Amino acid sequence: MNVAARASSPCPLCRGSRHAPYVVVKGYTYHRCEDCGFAFLDPMPSQMNLNAEYQGHKGINADYYPHAASRRRKALFRALRLIRHIRGRTVIDIGCGGGFFVGAARLLGATAATGVDVDASTVAYAQRAYPRCNFHCVPLELFVPAARYDLVHCSEVMEHAPDPHVLMRLLGACCRPGGHVFVTTPDLGSPNVPTPVGRWPGFAPPVHTGLFTEENLRTLFHRYGFRPVLRLPPRKTGMKLLFRLESIA
């Protein structure tokens, strides 16, 4: 990396200035931070433009969600892996999509199951498919939880956050002390990331605004009072981590 080629904006993760162009995908440039290893779009799209990008994808509506049966099975399998944190407890899914994990959590005995997503079409589908659950259609950066939850589920959302710290503050606000956050996101540090790196689907501009390694993701969660307690086996180039909120940052 040519560290001398500085970009105009600081690293969104560590706020450092030592970063330079890393890969260009579809005309968008990702920079990589020399200090923390985070890769991010520069220039960074605005949150408003990103929220607009998420509306009405793939023909989703209240009656249709692509591959719904497969998504439902995968959500149930994951919920079974996390059942000790679900049964008899409260659950919220940040970036819930069609509500599949929310529905699985309710089925497996969550006393309350809630989902939040910015896309009105996916929320409409979730509300119809899972009427015993609660759903909110609101930009994540504007969502204010009415309560704290025992389990916060946040799958394939971290890479969409132009400012990871805004999302972390939301996760902290949703999680009760002693509660857990389960997160999945692409892993830039995975040995399975292809060469050249620009072929990796993890780089998906403009909606994938930043890519983590397991090391810098753990560092970020530690900063906000979370301790890692479980690492599920990775699939392909993703990571799946469960954190416990030890203290409120």
Image: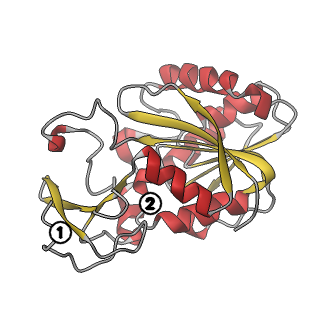
Whether label 1 touches label 2, CB < 8 Å: no
Q: Residues within 10 Å of mark 1 (few under 14, many from 20)?
A: some
Q: Identify the image quadrant of residue 248.
A: bottom right
What residue does disc 2 label? 161
Residue 138 seen in the figure: no
Residue farthest along the bottom direction in this orientation: 8
Of discs 1 and 2, which sits in the foreground? 1
Residue at point 56%, 39% (across, down): 125
Task: Report the front residue among 52 and 44.
Answer: 44
Pointer 1 or 2: first along the chain: 1
Q: Amino acid at mark 1?
A: Val
Mark on residue 3? Answer: 1
Secondary structure category for the residue under label 1:
loop
In the picture shown, does residue 8 fall above or below 180? below
The quarter of the rendered structure image containing the N terminus is: bottom left
Indicate the position of residue 51 as horizontal and vertical percent values: 42, 62
Q: Amino acid at mark 2?
A: Ala
Indicate the position of residue 96 as horizontal and vertical percent values: 57, 44
Please indicate whether residue 85 sits to the left or right of residue 59 in the image. right
The quarter of the rendered structure image containing the C terminus is: bottom right
In the picture shown, does residue 74 fall above or below 128? above
Q: Residues within 10 Å of mark 2 (few under 14, many from 20)?
A: many
Indicate the position of residue 126 as horizontal and vertical percent values: 60, 39
Q: How is the image coloured?
A: secondary structure
In the picture shown, does residue 56 fall above or below 75? below
Q: Determine the CA span between mark 1 and mark 2.
A: 24 Å
Residue at point 39%, 41% (across, down): 186
